[in-house]
Image (cartoon, grey):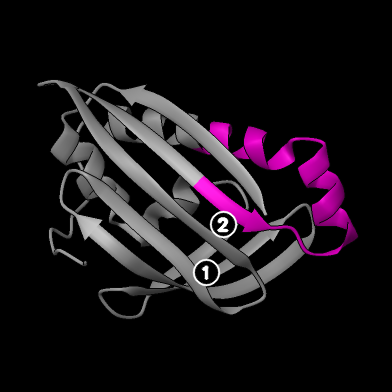
Amino acid sequence: MTKVEESIEVSVPVHTAYNQWTQFETFPEFMSGVERIEQRTDTLTHWVTDVNGVHREFDAEITEQIPDERVAWTTVAGDSRQAGVVTFHRLDDEHTKVMLQLDFEPEGLAETIGDKLGFVKRQTKGDLSRFKEYIEERGRESGGWRGVVT
């Protein structure tokens, strides 16, 4: 298992950052390699990714969700094994720290080499930077789901 931890400060209130993160179908707008996400139920998403020519489809289940605090998930089906959590930390009324922790199992030669070269860490950092640009340029979330999953 590989572990990646990255964080970024965004210039929006914690509820804005959190609400946008719960809009999984918008992830392709700021996450490179994510082609499509379908929200199938309140807790189940279907992902289609293509990272450097490696195509994957998998289902991920939200295992914990607390508004303005955290969203945790794990894969439950498909050809990717990962789990993670994103947490939201209020810095002040207009600033939030977003922290992402990801555990994943590289599969195949291309993913194993990419992992050893730090590709996933760089991609995660880039995705968080694009999230920052995305939410700060908008200044507001495109929606939000405030349900609790425990």
Outermost residue, right side: 109
Q: Does residue 128 appear left or right of residue 39 in this picture?
A: right
Q: Main secondary structure of the magenta part?
A: helix
Image position, residue 69 (x, y; %)? 21, 44
Q: Quadrant of residue 14?
A: top left
Image position, residue 82 (x, y; %)? 57, 61
Residue picked out by circle 2? 34
Outermost residue, left side: 93
Q: Quadrant of the C terminus?
A: bottom left
Bounds of the magenta segment: 102-127
Residue 122, disc: none
Specify the amino acid type for callout 1.
Trp
Residue picked out by circle 1? 47
Q: Residues within 10 Å of mark 2 (few under 14, many from 20)?
A: some
Q: Is residue 87 magenta?
A: no
Cβ–Cβ under 8 Å for marks 2 and 1 = yes
